[in-house]
Image (tube, rainbow, N blue to C red):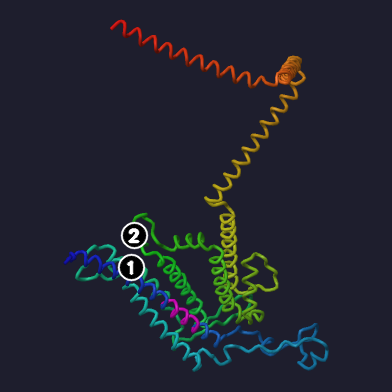
Amino acid sequence: AMHLDPRDMDDLSLLTSGRGLSKRIFQMRFLVMIVAMWGLLLGIGVIEWCWRGYIPTPEEEAGYCLGVNVENLKELDCLRAGFSWVPPVANPLDAFNYCTGTEAIIIKVFCSLFTLVLIAMQYHLYECYGREIALRSNTRRQTTTPRFWNQGLAPEFCLEVLVCLIHPPPGLSTDIFVEARGRTSVYSIESVLVSIMFLRVYLVWTYYREWLFARYTTKNFASRMNDVPMDSKLAVKAILDDQPFVFLAFVLVWTTLILAYLVRIAESPVNVQHLYFWNQLWLIVVTITATGYGDLYPITHLGRLICCIAMFVGAMMIATLTATVSSQLSLNAGESRLMMFLQSERWEKDIRLAAIKSIQSWWRRSIKHPKTLSALRNFRGKKRQYRKFLEATPHFGAFVSQMKDNNERVTEALSKMEATLQGAGAGSFA
C-alpha cells in the first residue's frame, strides 16, 4: 500500500482551502455589490419622496402676470388681456416636510438595515482576504491565522466602511440653504447623503475585476512570478484589450445615469426645466459628446460642477475610443506575416518586370548596332546552311549513330587485346 507524506496531505489541503477561499471571495463580492445597490436605490427613493425647492420672492409666492405694465392685474384679468399667468410658487419652509413623514422614515429604516448588512459582509469579505494572504505567504498550515488588519488591509477596509456607511438614517432631517444667482435653494440633508452614496458604484467595478481575474486559476502564482500586481490598472488594460467597445459602452451608460441623477439632485429644487429625468439625461449626453445645444443648462454651482466633470469624462472617453479604434485597425502578428508574404510576392513580380523591361530596352538599343546586325546575319546564314545540309542528307543521323557504334566496338577490341598482352608478358617473366 502507498502511504502519503503528511506534508503532502497538508499541501493538498492548503490548495483546496485556497480554491475554496477564492470562490467564497468571488461570491461575497457579488453579494456586497447587490446589497450596496439596493441600499442606493432606497436612498434614491428617500429623496424622490421629499424634494424641497427654493424660497420664492413675494411676487412669485403670490403669482404674477407675465407681460408689460401688468403689475396689478389678477389672474382672470391677465388671461383676458392675452397675457400669460405664472402660478404661485409654494415656499418650502411653509410646506410640510415629507422627509419626516412616515413613508420616508420607513424607507430610511430599510436603507439603514441594508447598510448594516453591507458593513457586516464587508468585514467577512476582508476576513477571507486575510486568510487568502496567509495561505499564499505560508507553505505550512499554522495553528492561528492572523487577522486582516495585521496584514496591511486595515486602511482599505476602513475606507470602504466609511464610504458604505454614509446613508440617510432615520431621525436625521434638516435643511441646507444655498444661494446662487440671487435665489436661495433649500436642500435636504438626505439629498447630500444620497449624492455621496453614489460612491458605492465602485463596488460594481470591484466585482467585475474579481470576475475578470477569477477565470484564471494560477493568477496569484503568475502575479508573483512576473512581479505585476493584479489591480484595477491591469484589469482596465485587460478589458480594453479583450472587449474595448463593450467596456466603453458600459462605462458611458453608467456615467451618464449617475451624472444625470446628480444634476437632478442639484437642479430640480430651483430649475423647473429639470423636473423630468429625461432632461438631465439629455443635458449630460450633449455635454459628454461636446455638442452643447444650449436648450438646457445648469444654474446652480453644484450643477455646473457636475457638468464640468461630464466634460472631462467625455474628453477621456473620446481619447480612449480613438486609441482603441486605432489599435483595433492595426494589423496583428498573423495579419502582418500574411501581408509581408503578399508584399514579397508583389516585389518579386515587380523585379522580374523591371528586369524584362531592362532587357527589352537593351535589346532595342543594341539591335541597331552594326556588330549586332552582322552577328545576326552570320547566325541566320549558318542556320540556313545547316538546315540545307540536313535536307540534303536525310540519313545523316543514322550514319552518325553507326559511326559511334563502330568506334565503341573498336575501343572494346583494343581493350581486350591490351589485357591479353599484359597477361602473356607476366607469364614469360615468371
Going from N to C along the chain, the mark reached first, 2 or 1, is 1
The verdict on residue 38 being magenta is: yes
Q: Is residue 332 magenta?
A: no
Name the chief secondary structure element in magenta.
helix
Q: Identity of the amino acid at label 1?
A: Leu
Q: Which residue is mark 1?
A: 153
What's the residue type where badge 2 is placed? Phe
Name the quadrant containing residue 35. Answer: bottom left
Magenta residues (range): 32-42
The image position of residue 338, as x and y in percent, is 56, 48
Q: Between residue 169 and residue 138, name the one nearer to us.
A: 138
Residue at position x 27%, y 62% in the image = 137
Q: Is residue 302 left or right of residue 357?
A: left
x, y percent for residue 165: 41, 78
> Which residue does the numbered mark 2 point to in the structure image?
221
Of all residues shown, which one is farthest toward the right? 81
